[in-house]
Amino acid sequence: MRALVYGAATALALAAAPAAAQQSQFEKYQKMVAEGSPVELFELSGEELWKKKQGPRQASLEKCDLGKGPGVLKGAYAALPRYFKDVDRVMDLETRLLHCMTTLQGRTREEATKRLFGDANQPSEMEYLSAYVAGQSRGTKLAPGAAHPKEKEAYELGKTMFFYRTGAWDFSCASCHGEAGKRIRMSELPVLSEPKAARPLMATWPAYRVSNSTFVTMQWRINDCYRQMRTPEPNFGSETTVALITYLTVTAKGEAYRGPGTKR
Amino acid sequence: MAAGPMKMRATLMGGVTDVRVLMTHPMETEQQTKGAPYFIQNVTVKVNGKTVVEGQISQAVSRNPVFSFRLKGGAKGDKIEVSWLDNKGESNKTEAAVA
Amino acid sequence: MNVVRRLLLVRAGAAALALGLLAPIRALAAWSKDAFAAKKADDALKSLGASGAEPSKDIVIEAPQIAENGAVVPIEIASTVPGTTSIAVLIEKNPYPLAGKFDFMEGALPFVKLNVKMAETSEVRVVASAGGKHYVATREIKVTIGGCGG
Amino acid sequence: MKRNLIVLAAFAATAAYAEPTARDVQQVLQRDFHPRGQATMERLAQDGVQRVCTETRDQPPAALAKQLEADQMKTIAFPSGSLMGDWKNGEKIAQSGRGSMWSDKPGAAAGGSCYNCHQLSPKELSHGTIGPSLLRFGKTRGNGADTQKYVYGKIYNAKAYNLCSQMPRLGHAGTLTEQQIKDLVALLLDPASPVNQ
């Protein structure tokens, strides 16, 4: 009986004082979830994988050049995406990791991309590695490449794609991320074309996602947005995905990286 | 993926040691596995070899469990050990010094 | 992830089993089977010998009023009832309400923070035991749907 | 007219920064995506509505918007008779976020994703706010034939009413069936629906 009365009172309180009271409760949930996050476990497993000898060459990724020189991890993630001379294109973290798997470890692209996005039971290699490498940039300000013509080109393409309406449901990225203070269900939607909203967000990706106990990467984020935009599937590491990540990271530049984060 | 890594931090602040421990475990419920749940049952916290917390938990604890415990006093360098045992008899433990 | 360690653990388990060592190990780590198998919170508490708890304001349950996802609901519990030696956490509407029981010995404060799964919106009941008496506090946590639901 | 010019001027200005052209973008998309499940490559080709809304950042010139909205209105197949279905089914459709994705089984029951953006039943606390609240929609607007027709049409093809609306054309896109849309009409307009309590 007491439970019933209390429950009814809560429902009334929520209905009577909607927006602000509810919002603070969502924030409290997010905060408590972030505090009790197992995300560091993914970094630990990622470190093991980074050092593990694999592929036909039985090589680890320890000599992988993420832009700051072979094997330099400190601050490398915060400077991505960027232009890489050896491949003459802009790469984000995952595209570059894949490049290192094929070149250093001698693995085929087909084998290395067989399972890019994992699940709760079996996270993917890319997810673990992303967690580890990103964690090595904590405290470093986001400073993606924005000077090389190809970096500028990527930024422009990303921006165009962000506002490009397409797919069976006519969405662009801005359909959901274009107006401040909006939500999908309970999830707040940052206006990612604005530095104010892009900064805290990009500073905490990639992230552990509590709703399905998985670690999610930026390539996954773009992929899953397009899935819900009802388009065909973007190719992993394609120019479009890297361009969008470039656009978002450049918009967020200057923010100190503090991920990997924890999301709903 | 059962006995993956654990991670622990033990920090002394204002006379209280805060112990935060992360465990890799699927914590599968009866519903998820359609019959045979798979979960940690016992969590034990020791300080310098002496048991201070004995926890019994169920399949309702979330995947990759994270616990915080608080210890009275303590000193920097005290050895904290946290171990778990699941319903299949697998176990794991981790140690950290209070910082 | 650590395959080597995992294999070692599995082997250690098998060896222990072969030598009949596993049973004593299990016996050391008590797990209140009947209480965890109870389908009603009251039955679980009875099994733990913690029935008839009286309401107390000295048990603090810190939790969000609304959880966006039932898979992870963070709960922080502290008891300031003098001499608290044990805390039990029960989620009334879960198939098996008892989520955990923590015994605190000298040196530990009666405090625990953990993440639990909630099948649906439910009362969370916390029972603290001190000097053979039991004290209870409850709190409702609403479980909703987040994201696009696809 | 003046607005047209402003829009054009804005384009000319951004073009200087090597923004990719519409044709460039289509080539990039065709190269960078692959079909999966029911999501075919044709979905990436922009129709007139998508193109105009992209090019004007959802601020189409009024005259053009009016003309294209009229074209969209012609796509709506209004069924004869009552447009009110079963609000209980409507509630289920409003709750479901599935349908038309590469991860959805073709032919499996789709949802309207309504709660993702709108408040409907006061019992559902987890609702989005991209679209307006539809709480007590039928209570304030009544449920006459014109209102039924408006709601049916809006769900079938939102672009017929507001060209660059963010709402999907749920009937036109083939996500929802005629009966499902009728059930949603009932969810909004039936006096017994929780929306109107």
Image (tube, coloured by chain):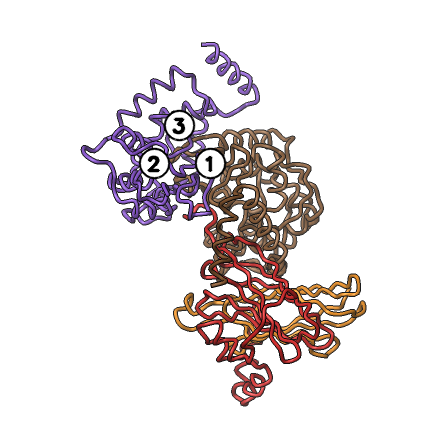
Q: Which chain is purple?
A: D
Res. A52 visible in picture? no
Closer to the eye: label 1 or 3: 1
Q: Secondary structure at mark 3?
A: helix
Amino acid at circle 1: Ile
Q: Which chain is orange?
A: B
Closer to the eye: label 2 or 3: 2
Q: Earlier in the sequence, mark 2 or mark 3?
A: 3
Q: Give how far across and how far down residue D157 sits, in percent.
A: 32, 31
Q: What label does residue D130 carry, if any?
A: 1
Q: Earlier in the sequence, mark 2 or mark 1?
A: 1
Q: Secondary structure at mark 2?
A: helix
Give the distance between the C-alpha atoms of the residues marked 2 and 3, in whole angstroms: 31 Å
Closer to the eye: label 2 or 1: 2
Residue D103, placed above or below residue A229: below
Amino acid at circle 2: Gly
